Amino acid sequence: MESVKTQENRDKLFEWLTSDVLPAGDKDTRLVFIGTPLHEDSLLRRLEKQFEVGNPRNVFRRYPILDENGKPLWPGKFPNEADIQAEREKCLNERAWLREYMLKIVSPDDQRVQREWIQYYKDFPTGPDARFRQITLGIDPARSQSATADYTAMVGARVYGAGTERTIYILPNPVNAKLTTEQILNKVEMLTLAYGAGGKTLRVYVEDVNFQGILAELLVGKGIRAKLFPLKGRSKDDRLEAIVRLIEVGKILFPEKGAEKLIEQILGFGSEKHDDLVDAFTMTVLQSLEDTKRYPQIFVL
């Protein structure tokens, strides 16, 4: 379990496989990987995703104790439902049963956001009833350019509806990189164009810590509506906890592609080394909620 607990560990294992193991074989060497998928970004899941779009000679097979119709895949050992139930009772641990026998990826007990809560969208709402409100961009700038420092993160969202109908659509391809101040300014300008956001629809918020106040002023100087996001004494845990319910009930939706790294940081919050995207994400959501309460009549297309 430790090998998949953090992004760093998962990357190291994949690097070891691709740098040390795979080159060691002869031209006729056949490799067989056997194991249990422990994480959506685990070594087995990475191989499965690559096999789906790569060389057709690569094959991935999954053999849980029961198939999708509830039929035993090892009838010689488990010929009927009673045998399956006896094995399940012997296991004594439902989470272990799901993981080791059913080959399902099970979230840790202390995980704040469960993977099954994540819901996706294909397109944005359209038509007169869509009630588009605004685009929000949350920025968590890195405080250092050192190799061990955090990354600058930017997460954008489109907000639709009001009250209980309000839904926040996280925009694809959030920024998570080492950026200088000048690069941050340029990136925000590029995102403004990419989002198709005019001055009345885009609201940019910068975390209110240390030099970030200057960054907000620089953005304003470029004609971008930017303000500081006040932390109000709220910790990272507090900010995520405040919006967990919205994720669970589908009031925060994620793009089908382009937000994988953000989702992994959300699911791994508390164990992953970096959580910059989570900071920008919670900032974007909380400020979107605040803005749509403060300006209830804004509907700009």
Image (cartoon, grey):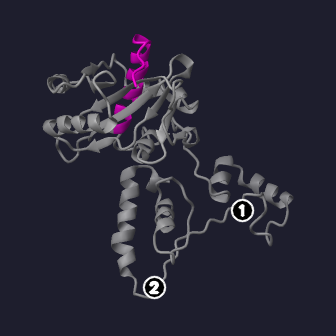
Camera-nearest residue between 173 and 140 = 173
Q: Amino acid at mark 2?
A: Thr
Q: Position of residue 97 (x, y in %)?
A: 68, 53
- Label 1 is placed on what type of residue? Ile
> Which residue corresponds to the image point at 23% horizontal and 46% vertical from the top-left?
148
Q: Is residue 57 visible to the viewer in this orientation of the structure? A: yes
* Residue 176 position in % (x across, y down): 30, 43
Q: Which residue is mark 1?
A: 65
> How far apart, in angstroms, are the residues tagged by discs 1 and 2?
30 Å
Q: Main secondary structure of the magenta part?
A: helix
The residue sitting at 22% across, 44% down in the picture is: 178
Tag 1 secondary structure: loop
Q: Are marks 1 and 2 in contact (CB under 8 Å)?
A: no
Q: Which mark is residue 29?
A: 2
Instruction: Indicate the quadrant where residue 226 lies.
Output: top left
Q: Indicate yes or no whether the magenta region holds residue 48.
A: no
Which image quarter is the C terminus in? top left
Q: Residue at x 44, y 45 (%)?
A: 264
Q: Nearer the viewer, residue 88 or 281?
A: 281
Please give the range of residues in magenta: 277-301
Residue 122: image x %, image y %? 51, 42
Which mark sits nearer the N-terminus, 1 or 2?
2
